[in-house]
Every structure is written in structure tokens, then in C-alpha cells.
Amino acid sequence: MEKRNKTTLSGKHFLSGDLACAEGAIAAGCRFFGGYPITPATEIAERMARRLPEVDGVYIQMEDEIGSIAAVIGASYTGKKAMTATSGPGFSLMQENIGLAVMTEAPLVIVNIMRGGPSTGQPTMPGQQDVMQARWGSHGDYEIIAIAPSSVQEMFDLTIECFNLAETYRVPVLLLADEIIGHMWEKVEIPPREEITIINRKKPKAQPKEYKPFKPAKNLVPPMACFGEGYRFHATGLTHDEDGKPQTVSVEEQNKLVKRLCDKIRKNAEDIIKVEEVTLEDAEVAVIAYGITSRAALSAVRKARKKKIKAGLLRLITIWPFPGKLVAEIAGKVKAIIVPEMNYGQLVREVERAAKTTPVFLLSKLGEEPHRPAEIVSAIEEVLK
Amino acid sequence: MKESDLMLRHPLAAYLRQERMPHIWCEGCGNGVLLNSFFEALDKLKLDLDKVVVVSGIGCIGRAAGYVNVDSFHTTHGRAIPFATGVKLANPELEVVVISGDGDLFAIGGNHFIHAARRNVDIKVICANNFNYGMTGGQYGPTTPLGSWTTTTPYGSIEHPFNLVHLAAASGAVYVARWTTLQVRKLTDSIKKALGKEGFSFVEVISPCPEIYDRYNKLGTAVEVMKWFKLISQTQHGCTPENAEISKRQIIIGEFVDIKKPSYGRLLREMTTRVKESFQEKKAK
């Protein structure tokens, strides 16, 4: 077993994506993990079970994923940074309480190492089949943040980013990785602790008597008091006013709350969204990809360029909120867009919506193998014919 | 004198979010009695209210979390216990109390109940048992007695109900008691005792539902149901929980379990201390 004698790791390490995710969480300040074993996310739980007691944190294995996410919301309300990690079936079980976390504005992180579905599907095989469930899985109108890492390094870096976004916007943030990224081993370079940006939730300045738990600040995010701090506030999954009082029949309060919950993501989307653009300036064909698929896409775009084909890549690091404006701009400049996905067509729908009249082609993959660069190169050549 | 003045003069007024009144409960409902006993127990124990958290699920009594003047959370249906587990483990300083109903805790949330009791998580669960789903208009639930009438058992219930105190005891609770809303003092004492225990404590409160369940089953008005409670309640402290019957003939009440066992929180703290010490040694080397 490797030696771990630091609260947070630094320097160069050889890690799997799942382990890098756990280390990223600890570096971000996560001190509570509630989870349930599930392939291919189990290694995150295992690492957290070993690591959290070392840093005075709490690991608890709950009786199911419904309990896991409930416990994580509870821990978040005490002020702890909290997370859970799961895969498709567990993610489905969590959906109702993801809505609760959205409604009560609980900052937390949910890692979903996507496998093949539907149902039990292919537990040990990769997939990108939960992209739409991530966006729309819980009932009601809401916005969510979902981030797709494409390397083990990013499993570390973007897990920290997830916590920072969760704390900034008081939302559950999803790290949507796939089985390959979760189980792949690569070099990870961890910067010294003082060089890692850590964001913590804003605390209220109001005195407990004046405190309104859901009164937003300018950026539409309410400062958050925690249980036990003397504010004595109430939170509920029911539609509520700024005071947290249930408003079950008020048209006005329903509009006000639902719109704010959505707008705090929509109006801050430019600050949230991260993408990587590769040779898009003069591109005639754009490939839009995320996660493991974006690695093959990058290789394909480079190969195409060597063949004097003007191809470019838009790698989505943030999937939700979807960078629709940017995709529309790119669509206006290229002849066609190719979307390779390890599903039967999910994010491609969002691309189509943004691309309007520009033709969009889905390159679907289901099962074991991710796309090969050559397949994407062929598709690029095909759409230019 | 105005109603609001009366409320302000009530000795337990400080425990209630008065601005949230009037509550949603029907006249004659037992939930108010339960809440009053809970407040009185807090008062007697002189607990720091800044450190008390009340968590509830969905249902009539689920609204209790919104009425108590402490930090409180109204979760999704059935999930009060795992939420409370997260709160307690993340901040052991807090006194975490779950107040919820029989349907919420034992149908949709049944799995969480048995596992929290098995782990002996240091939370207190107070269950208002009114034998049906009142909020949705009176459907049968996990505690509805065999043969009872509800809106979804129009020919009488053909399901065997849970004996909640037996379930709690078998799952590992360190304190288990049952009262009806008639035995207010005993109930208050039990809640007080539960709050003082280390580990998972459970208090069942048999509660009238005069507008729905009691009406469907022709049990009479709220007052008549309370008289009926008086007639058939039988105190049997230490009774084997399995034999603590609830039937039309009798309701066995009392304290059934009062044992000592290290709580999950204690074991967790001990383990963490152990791990941290060896971690520090490793670090020093």
C-alpha cells in the first residue's frame, strides 16, 4: 500500500480516477461521505472510508442511495462539505432528494461514474447514458450544474471545482464521469495546498432575529446559516417564502422561488461554464464531445488537421448549464457538427437545439469500447463530402 | 383577551414559532398534545434550544418541524431519519429529534428506521401513530388494524399491521415506549428520558384522528376517543414488546425497553481518535 502521511496529498501520484476524485474531495474540504457500494464508483467510497477518519471526517455507509443523499443533505446543513458517489441505478434512486437539495439549496456534490443502462445494464462497462437524467431526473423545474472530467487529473481538479460551485451557488453539483475515467490509472499532479482555490459558502451577516434563510443576495444566492449556530431557522421541500415558511397555494411565491432557483444558475451561467476549444477558429467541421469521448475526439481532430481538413473540437467540461450560446456561435461558422457520445443520442439533442439549421450528426456508441479516433476522422470526412 | 395574547402568556410559548400559527391540524387531533409534551420535555431538561434540531417527514405531523422554534427541516416523504443521521454525525453537539408519522416512518421510511436503530445512531424518534394516512384523506397504512375501514380498505383492511414497539426493539433501539395522547405526563417523562439516553430512542404516541380514521371506524368524537383510550389503556412496564398489543380491547402502554449500548456516534469518535493518533505518528516519522 502506498504511503499517505499528509492531510491532503501533493506532488505527483499514480491514481485511478475514482481515487483521484476522493483525494480531490478531501483537498476541497469534504468531511462527510454518505454512500452505498455500486460498481464502478465503489472505490471512491472505499478511499473515503479509509481517508476521512484521518482528517476528522465522517464516512457512513447508508442502507441505500436514498438514505445516502438524505444524510449528505443533513450533513451539509450543519456546515460540513459533504458528498456521495454512485452510478446509474443509485443515481436514479437519489433523484427525489436531489430535488430536495435544489429546493432547500443544500451545497453538496454527487459523483456519478456512469455505466451502461437502462436498469442494471452493464455494471462494469462505460456509458454516458445519464446525461439527460442529470438534467431532468428530479420532478419540477430546476437548473443543475454537471461537470464531465476527461482524465484522472481532472477527476481531482474538477471534484474541487464541484465543491467550489456547490458552495458558491448553494446547489447540488454533479460530477458526471464514466467508468473508463473512474477506473483508468494516470499520473496526477497535485499542487501544494496553498495553491488550491477553495471556496466556502457565504455566511449571513444578519442577526438571528432578522435572518431570512432564503432571502437571496445580489447573485440570487441566499447566505447560509447552519444548524446549531443560533439562527433557529426552518427549511422545507415545500414551496416557501424568504423566511422558509411553506407557501403551498401562493401563485406569487411559486413563481418567485422556482424562477430564482433556475435563474441563479441561468444568470450566472457564464461564470459557471468551462469549455476547451481546439482549432475552432477556421473549422469547417466541429466535434462536440465530453468525458472519455473527448479524448478520442481530440486525437481525431488533430489527425484530420494533418490531412488538411479544417476540423475543430469543442470539449464540454461543463455539460449543465449547457453552453448553448457558444454552440450556436460555432454552428454559425461550420458546415456540420459531429457529436460522439456513449449513448444512443442525449446531449446531441441539446446541440441540435442550439445549432438550428446547421446539420448535427450523432456518433453513437453503446457497450464496452469508447470511440476510436479513426471512426471520428471518418465521420468528419463523411460530413464534408 | 385576544387569542394571540393568550398564546404569548402560555408558559411554553417560547418553543413555538407563533408567527406560523394557526397550524394545519384538525380539531381534536393528537398532534398538538404530542408537540406540547415535547416542548415540556425540552423545558424540563433546560436544553439549549440553539442546539436542538427537529426533523420531520411528510404527513400531518410532518408540519411539526415548521412549528418548533429551533433549527428544523421538513424532508421528503420517509427520509427524516437518514437526514437526521447526517445531521447528528456531522455535528454530534446537536440534539436531533425526528417527529413524524406512522406511514412516513414505517411504510416509505421503514428501511431507514430499522437501520438507524440497528446502528444505534444517537437520534430520538417520536412517532404519531393515528393508524392511517391523514394528510391524503385517510388511506390505510402499515399500522392500520386488521379489519379497519379506510378510504382504500372499503371492505375492511386485510393486512396485518406492524407492532411498532416490537419492531423498534428487535431493530436495536435502546429505549422504547408507547403512550396514548391521554397520558400526557407519562408521555412527557418518556420523551424527556428518550432525550437523555445515548443512542436510538423511540417513543410511539397513539393519537386520535377524529376527522378521518376515527370517523370511518365509528370511534366517536375526539373526546369519546380519549375516553376510550382511558378505558382500554393498560400500563405494563417491561412487557415483552412482542406482547404489547394494540387492539379494540386493549392498548398496552408503558416503557418496554431501556438498555445501554454504545451509540454509533461514540464508536465513530473512538475509531476516529484511534485512526488520527496513528496517522499523526505516521506523519511525525
Image (cartoon, coloured by chain):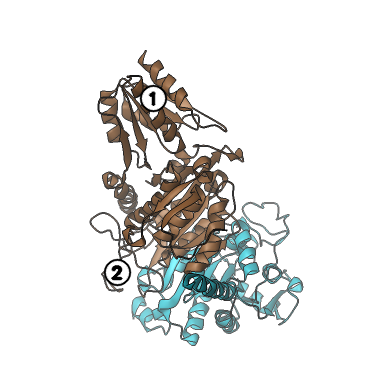
Chain colours: A brown, B cyan
Residue B104: percent from left, percent from top: 57, 60
Residue A230: percent from left, percent from top: 36, 75
Pinpoint the chain carrying mark 1: A
Q: Secondary structure at mark 2?
A: loop
Q: Which residue is mark 2?
A: A211
Lower position in the chain sequence, tag 1 or tag 2: 2
Q: Is residue B248 above or below residue A151?
A: below
Q: Front-most of A187 and B75?
A: A187
Name the residue furthest top.
A385
* Residue A84 left/right relative to A380: right
Q: Residue at x 58, y 57 (%)?
A: B138
* Residue A317 left/right relative to B197: left
Crowding near the residue tagged with mark 2, few <14, some 14–19, many ≥20 C-alpha atoms within 10 Å: some
Q: Secondary structure at mark 1?
A: helix
Q: Residue at x 44, y 42 (%)?
A: A136
Quadrant of the rendered image containing residue A322:
top left
Q: Amino acid at mark 2?
A: Tyr
Query: Would you say residue A165 is visible in this rendering?
Result: yes
Q: Which mark is residue B75?
A: none
Q: Amino acid at mark 1?
A: Lys
Residue B179: percent from left, percent from top: 63, 77
Q: Is residue A294 above or below residue A107?
A: above
Crowding near the residue tagged with mark 1, few <14, some 14–19, many ≥20 C-alpha atoms within 10 Å: some
Q: Nearer the viewer, mark 1 or mark 2?
A: 1
Quarter the N terminus of chain A occupies: bottom right
Q: Which residue is mark 1?
A: A303
